Image (cartoon, grey):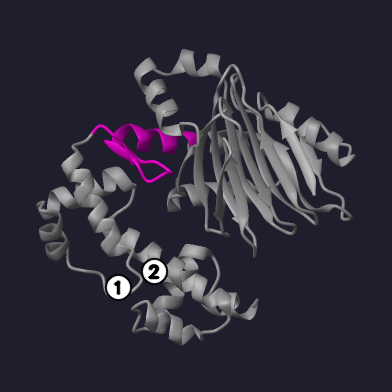
């Protein structure tokens, strides 16, 4: 296993330490892995002073343990992760272990005040955009109440949410950017800052945000939040093979349809049907990866009567057709 322990203050410094650990010389702001260790690269973007950013798209042939030690001058980290692995990977924060599987992408907000640890099995691909905001920068650029809210949400264990479709598009643009282009560094800087802007805009317009531990950090009314959690349970039920009508959901939540749709999007960052559709497509992917079901069986199981529509929705969500997932088993 490769173990990398560091204190995050700047991704250039982080990259120098990582290249030294691997015994691989790195060009300024760029590390390309040799074939005997893995494949892919890590590149440093050039955002404004006070922000440090890296674009990672690499895979190691060995297990990787990343340990971010607590920083006494805490900043905030905003990660747009797309981790692809066939095994469980482990995340630890302050001694608490959590397991996760490969996913279509997560936004992760953490504070460097707390120790964070992640273990990735060999052959896992770490792909994404990673931003670090220093404490002096945050104090200069953000109002104190907003800054306090961000640190409250990040907490000791961090905050995660699915990456929106719009942010996934930006992420793909960054990872696909051509290093030989004269506009390469400009592309990296502008797109990474736009990703940060998208998150902050969403954060400021939401009245409540669910934390990773299931609790809700909220400005809104507790009654509404409890009602919406009930709606989430309904839409996440694996036995549900048809989207309930808005009228039924409104009666269940004891809200008007307009209020239900508005409050749900405020808190969960997506529309009701989008939440339902993402959940059932995620369920479909899990079924396909077992290799026990045909594409037709999976599509019918999650409520698609038209397999063409199922294939289109699946590809839009995951970038591949259902049969391609089945073929790789």
Q: Which residue is mark 1?
A: 240
Location of residue 162 with respect to 217 vertically, above or below: below
Range of magenta residues: 196-219
Whichever of callouts 1 and 2 sits on the residue coming sooner in the sequence is 1
Q: Is residue 278 left or right of residue 177?
A: left
Measuring 50% from the left and 76% from the top, which residue is drawn there? 287
Q: How far separated are the C-alphas under marks 1 and 2?
A: 9 Å
Tell me if mark 1 has few (under 14), some (14-19) or many (20+) residues whose alpha carbon lies within 10 angstroms of its own: some
Residue 183 visible in the displayed image: no
Number of marks in picture: 2
Residue 162 visible in the displayed image: yes
Work out whether residue 312 or residue 78 is closer to the camera in this orientation and state it: 78
Q: Which residue is mark 2?
A: 280
Measuring 44% from the left and 73% from the top, which residue is drawn there? 312
User: Judging from the image, what secondary structure is the residue with disc 2 in?
Assistant: helix
For residue 298, which numbered disc appears in the image? none
């Amino acid at each position: 296993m490769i173990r990398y322990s560091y204190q995050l203050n700047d991704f250039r410094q982080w990259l120098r330490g990582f290249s030294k650990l691997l015994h691989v010389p790195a060009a300024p702001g760029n590390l390309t892995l040799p074939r005997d260790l893995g494949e892919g690269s890590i590149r440093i973007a050039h955002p404004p002073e006070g922000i440090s950013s890296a674009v990672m798209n690499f895979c190691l042939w060995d297990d990787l343990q990343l340990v971010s030690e607590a920083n006494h001058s805490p900043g905030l980290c905003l990660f747009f992760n797309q981790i692809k692995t066939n095994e469980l990977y482990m995340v630890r924060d302050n001694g608490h272990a959590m397991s996760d599987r490969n996913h279509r992408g997560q936004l992760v907000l953490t504070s460097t005040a707390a120790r964070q640890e992640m273990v990735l099995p060999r052959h896992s691909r770490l792909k994404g955009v990673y931003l670090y905001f220093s404490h002096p920068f945050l104090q200069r650029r953000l109002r104190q109440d907003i800054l306090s809210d961000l640190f409250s949400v990040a907490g000791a264990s961090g905050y995660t949410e699915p990456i929106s479709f719009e942010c996934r598009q930006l992420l793909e643009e960054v990872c696909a950017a051509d290093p030989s282009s004269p506009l390469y560094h400009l592309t990296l800087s502008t797109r990474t800052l736009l990703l940060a802007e998208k998150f902050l805009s969403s954060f400021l317009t939401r009245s409540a945000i669910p934390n990773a531990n299931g609790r809700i950090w909220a400005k809104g009314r507790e009654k509404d939040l409890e009602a919406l959690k009930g709606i989430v349970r309904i839409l996440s039920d694996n036995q549900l093979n048809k989207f309930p009508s808005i009228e039924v959901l409104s009666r269940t939540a004891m809200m008007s349809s307009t209020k239900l749709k508005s409050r749900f999007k405020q808190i969960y960052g997506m529309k009701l049907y989008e939440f339902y559709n993402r959940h059932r497509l995620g369920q479909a992917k899990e079924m396909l990866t077992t290799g026990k079901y045909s594409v037709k069986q999976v599509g019918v199981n999650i409520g698609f009567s038209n397999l063409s529509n199922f294939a289109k929705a699946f590809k839009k969500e995951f970038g591949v057709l259902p049969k391609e997932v089945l073929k790789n088993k």
